[in-house]
Amino acid sequence: MKQKSAEYQKGLALLERLHGGQSGEQLVRSLETVCPDLIDMTLEWALSGIMGRPGLDLVTRELLLVASCVTIGGGAEPQLAAHIDAALKEGATKEQVLETILQVLFYAGGVKVSNAMRQAGEVFKQHSL
């Protein structure tokens, strides 16, 4: 096994912080025998390279990802739930999550926003909100 880069380690730490015990570990397990390079790219580029940048705090970054997942709609439900969960873990409020979802109503459409609200409700239950 090759030595993992500093970026990989930074991304892994951020993955654990944001998604530990849940979607992050599931992502790694689901891809480790199929395409471990995708795991490396995700950790080094998406997490360390993008999420780990200065300029925006993690709550803002997670809320942006919530909005993006709402706009994508069908097929992004696991990612939507994971980013709502991470936003809450980082200190976002229920109101901030709901307002983020509502913000994209006219761009994403009513069906996508309605579905995202139901998904948010499930995550809120897990957080006892």
Image: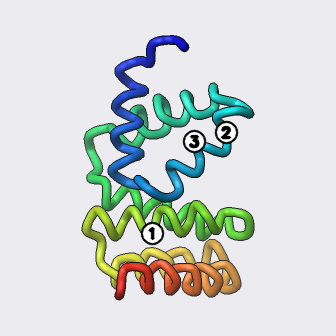
Element carrying mark 1: helix
- At label 3, counting other C-alpha atoms closer than 10 Å, the crowd grade (few under 14, some 14-19, many 20 or more) is some
- Where does residue 127 sit, x and y in percent of width and height? 37, 79
The image shows residue 73 at horizontal and vertical percentages of 68, 69
Marks 2 and 1 sit apart, C-alpha to C-alpha, by 23 Å
Q: Earlier in the sequence, mark 2 or mark 1?
A: 2
SS at mark 2 in the image: helix
C-beta proximity under 8 Å, tags 2 and 3 = yes
Number of callouts in the render?
Answer: 3
In the rendered view of the protein, which quadrant contains the C terminus? bottom left
Name the residue nearer the viewer: 112 or 16: 16
Q: Which mark is residue 28?
A: 3
Q: Residue at x 34, y 84 (%)?
A: 95
User: Looking at numbered disc 3 in the image, what kind of residue is underneath it?
Assistant: Val
Question: Looking at the rendered structure, which numbered label has been put on residue 84?
Answer: 1
Please state, as top left, top right, bottom left or bottom right, where the N terminus lies in the image.
top right
In x, y percent, where is residue 43? 48, 34
Left or right relative to 58: residue 45? right
Instruction: Name the element at disc 3.
Output: helix
- Which residue in the structure is indicated by mark 2? 31
Colour setting: rainbow
How would you rate the neighbour count of disc 1 (Cα within 10 Å): few for under 14, some for 14-19, many for 20 or more? many
- First in sequence: mark 1 vs mark 3: 3
